[in-house]
Image (cartoon, grey):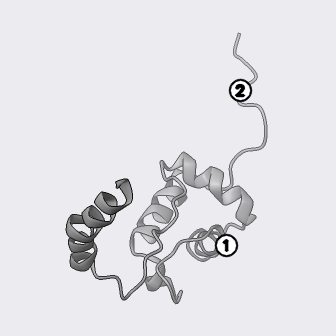
Amino acid sequence: MKGAGRAGRLTRLDDAGRSRLKEALKKGAGAWGFTTHLWTMERIARVIKRVCGVTYHPRHVGRIMRGLGWSRQRPVRRAVERDEATIVEWGKYRWVEIKKNSAA
């Protein structure tokens, strides 16, 4: 006797759609007309609509992305003016002096 099969609603985004979505996201957000290169759930939902013709609520997009093996990440916030060489120099010399003087 055969089982009843999968429970619940069938997905609207099939394997071919998921594959197209992966390729679309690899192009980057700039390729889709967004001003920054940061992917947000709202932006991904728009791309899914344009590429696959399927509408998803932005909150549901996270589940789709996890299913594709993507994880949520936040960009590192650093000043554009940041000077790495100066920071290293400060850590090697100035911080050592401050640390020595504070222990006395």
Quick one: label 1, few (<14), some, or many (20+) residues within 10 Å?
some
Q: Residue at x 77, y 31 (%)?
A: 7
Identify whether 11 is placed above or below 81. Answer: above
Amino acid type indicated by mark 1: Glu
| Whole-percent x, y for residue 33 in the image | 51, 89
Q: Secondary structure at mark 1?
A: helix
Q: Nearer the viewer, residue 88 or 76?
A: 88
- Quarter of the image for residue 45 reads bottom right
Provide the residue designation for mark 1: 42
- What residue lies at 71% left-to-right and 9% top-to-bottom? 1
Say if mark 1 contacts mark 2, CB within 8 Å: no
Q: Quadrant of residue 78?
A: bottom left
Left or right: residue 60 versus residue 92 is: right
Res 56 seen here = no
Q: Which residue in the structure is indicated by mark 2?
A: 5
| One can see residue 9 in this view | yes
In the rendering, at what x and y percent does residue 10 appear?
A: 72, 45
- In the current view of this chain or complex, which residue is farthest to the top? 1
The amino acid beneath tag 2 is Gly
**52 and 83: which is toward the camera:** 83
Q: Position of residue 104 (x, y in %)?
A: 34, 55
